[in-house]
């Protein structure tokens, strides 16, 4: 018998992944609520129905799948609704910033030259507006990349 790598109590069940470390079924079930990957070898667990839930019933699995699907649909809805809003808002911020700093040099922001809705829509799909969106989002993109690199580091080794 070995010790469970989660609760450190004795157990005789192995983790359903490549490393096959000792782990209780209950501990594994709790751990899988947060991640579908092993915390030791970082690989996906094998699809073993007995290890997914304590009761082994299909209704628990169905409810988990339904819950994940519902969450996915909500995320997609938010992405579809908020992406255009974020694009326009960050573009307006970028246009104001570029217009403020470019005004002494004769640059006027595209979006502030509009007289009607058609010209506004033409302005927000223009290349200048897109560049202002990129200008505003570059710091966020760089920060996201550095955070992703930090998350991928395991024991000082970049995966």
Image: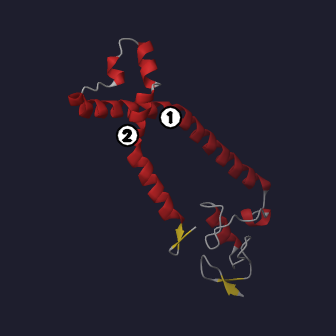
Quadrant where the image shows the C terminus: bottom right
Q: Which of marks 2 and 1 is nearer the N terminus?
A: 1
Q: In this view, does 72 lie above or below 50?
A: above
Q: Residues within 10 Å of mark 1 (few under 14, many from 20)?
A: few
Nearest the camera: 13 or 85?
85
Image quarter for residue 86?
Answer: top left
Q: Is residue 68 above or below residue 115?
A: below
Q: Which residue is under mark 2? A: 136
- How far is the residue under mark 2 from the one under mark 1? 15 Å
Badge 2 marks a residue whose secondary structure is: helix
- The image shows residue 5 at horizontal and vertical percentages of 62, 79
Q: Residue furthest left?
A: 104
Q: Residue at x 65, y 63 (%)?
A: 32
Q: Which residue is drawn at 42% across and 34% down?
A: 131
User: In the rendered view, does 2 fall on the left or right side of 148?
Assistant: right
Q: Is residue 54 visible?
A: no
């Amino acid at each position: 018998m070995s010790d469970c790598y989660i609760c450190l109590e004795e157990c005789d069940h192995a983790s359903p992944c490549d490393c096959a470390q000792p782990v209780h079924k209950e501990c594994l079930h709790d751990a899988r609520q947060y991640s579908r990957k092993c915390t030791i070898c970082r690989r996906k667990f094998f699809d073993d129905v007995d290890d997914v839930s304590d009761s082994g019933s299909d209704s628990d699995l169905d409810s988990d799948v339904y819950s994940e699907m519902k969450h996915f649909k909500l995320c997609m809805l938010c992405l579809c609704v908020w992406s255009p809003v974020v694009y326009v808002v960050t573009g307006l911020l970028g246009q104001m910033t570029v217009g403020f700093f470019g005004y002494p040099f004769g640059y006027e922001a595209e979006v502030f030259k509009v007289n009607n809705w058609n010209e506004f829509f033409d302005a927000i799909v223009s290349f200048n507006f897109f560049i202002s969106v990129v200008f505003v989002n570059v710091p966020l993109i760089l920060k996201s990349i550095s955070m992703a690199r930090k998350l991928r580091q395991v024991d000082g080794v970049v995966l």
